[in-house]
Image (cartoon, rainbow, N blue to C red):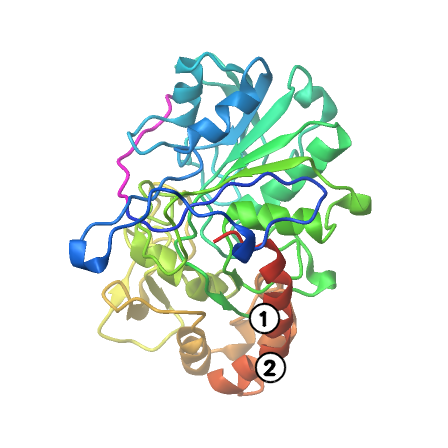
Amino acid sequence: MNIILKSSFALIGSLAIALSCGSSKPLKGKEISQNPIENKTAKDETIAPIKTGADNSEKYLSILKGKKVGIVTNQTGILSDKTHLVDFLLEKKVNIQKIYAPEHGFRGTADAGELIKDGKDTQTGLPIISLYGDNKKPKPEQLKEVDVLVFDLQDVGARFYTYISSLHYVMEACAENNIPLVILDRPNPNGGVVDGPILEKENTSFIGMHPIPVLHGMTIGEYGQMINGEKWLKNGIQCQLTVIPCLNYNKEMNYSLPVKPSPNLPNDQSINLYASLCFFEGTNVSLGRGTEKQFQIYGSPFLPKSGFSFTPKPNFGAKDPLHNGKLCYGEDLSGISKISGLQLKWLLKAYNSTSDKSKFFIPFFTKLAGTKKLQEQIEAGLTEPEIKKTWQVGLENFKKIRKNYQIY
């Protein structure tokens, strides 16, 4: 494998907390202690910077001292000074045994769904074990020589973003092999937004493993607590879990990621539109893979000719994009204002204007939606407000459960 990537980190913030939890009930927001370093008022025009869990090193270095350590991470596992977590821990004389890489690989360069192979990091010589493809869950033999596992991945707050599925399998493997897990928390760039249909059990897959909405409004540390607390692991087992929290952070803040979390989420706009436009992955419409505006445009040869068009071609992160080499007509959303919540208007517009509705959806759409109802509602001609109304009971029930695991 190639060298570890590093990137710059933009910082802002407000709230601070610290916690450790295992099978016991996690801390609720009102029980969290305040950071003694208070933010200044708006009048002072300065606020304390956000510190990610990785930057909150005084809380986890003591846990790792004298232990054989494994790390689940990728290019997003960086500190505010651009240092990668692996480099930082090695500098601190932490005994790292192995790196475990999720979808897109350790460097985050592989296509979505591409098979990731085991390898070796050329800079450190550490072995890299893939947690994607046929080996989504670390095997007992892959956890030998490991006393504690560290998890540091930047999530984007959407159910079908597979880093939370990787977290599930890592937690399950840790529970089965009696290995403690330490999650280094990171802000959710989509904040506390909760929206979308709840996944139904019969539609469980690696892009949706739990009964949650599309936008879950949790950090990955909070999500790990929910996996434990709701006993979603096999046979209801629980992982010995410690969450190292972000400091000076709350979910009302805008948070710009310092590095791309995956090849086809290149900027803040794509991350903001991701949950809404990802539904096109279950249709015959391109969402910009094979262009420089992934998850910011959509179009296909089957939509009406319009003023905007593009032609997908193989590029970084898309070796064989949908409609490769074909002219696609659609819409450019790269310049629109930030949206809040899940928007169905572009999906509905494309469906209602496509030349052959019978070929619009593919079976993958149900996996993305987590329910067959959404496709049925669209085909029946329901409006966006009518569809969203059917989500409300499920969303309110989820929010009640979510409260038990909120940190920020």
Which residue is the extreme one toward the left?
44
How far across and down, in percent of the image, does residue 224 sit?
A: 60, 46
Quarter-wise, where is residue 80 in the image?
Answer: top left
Mark 1 to mark 2 CA distance (whole Å): 8 Å
Instruction: Mark 1 or mark 2: name the one nearer the start of the chain.
Output: 1
- In the depicted structure, whether residue 159 falls above or below residue 350: above
Q: Are marks 1 and 2 in contact (CB under 8 Å)?
A: yes
- In the depicted structure, whether residue 75 falls above or below residue 10: above
Q: Quadrant of the N terminus?
A: top left
Residue 11, label in figure = none
How far across and down, in percent of the image, does residue 316 sit?
A: 34, 40
Residue 247 appears left or right of 169: left
Q: Helix or strand or loop: what does disc 1 sit on?
A: loop
Q: Residue at (17%, 59%) from the top-left corner?
A: 43
| Residue 98 visible, this orientation | no
How far across and down, in percent of the image, does residue 58 sit?
A: 44, 27
How far across and down, in percent of the image, does residue 11 sit?
A: 28, 44
Residue 390, label in figure = 2
Name the magenta segment's main secondary structure.
loop
Residue 197, label in figure = 1
Nearer to the camera, 297 or 44: 44
Start-end of magenta stretch: 3-11
State how many labels appear: 2
Q: Residue at (44%, 37%) from the top-left corner?
A: 53
Quarter-wise, where is residue 364 in the image?
Answer: bottom right
In the rendered structure, which amino acid carries the disc numbered 1? Pro
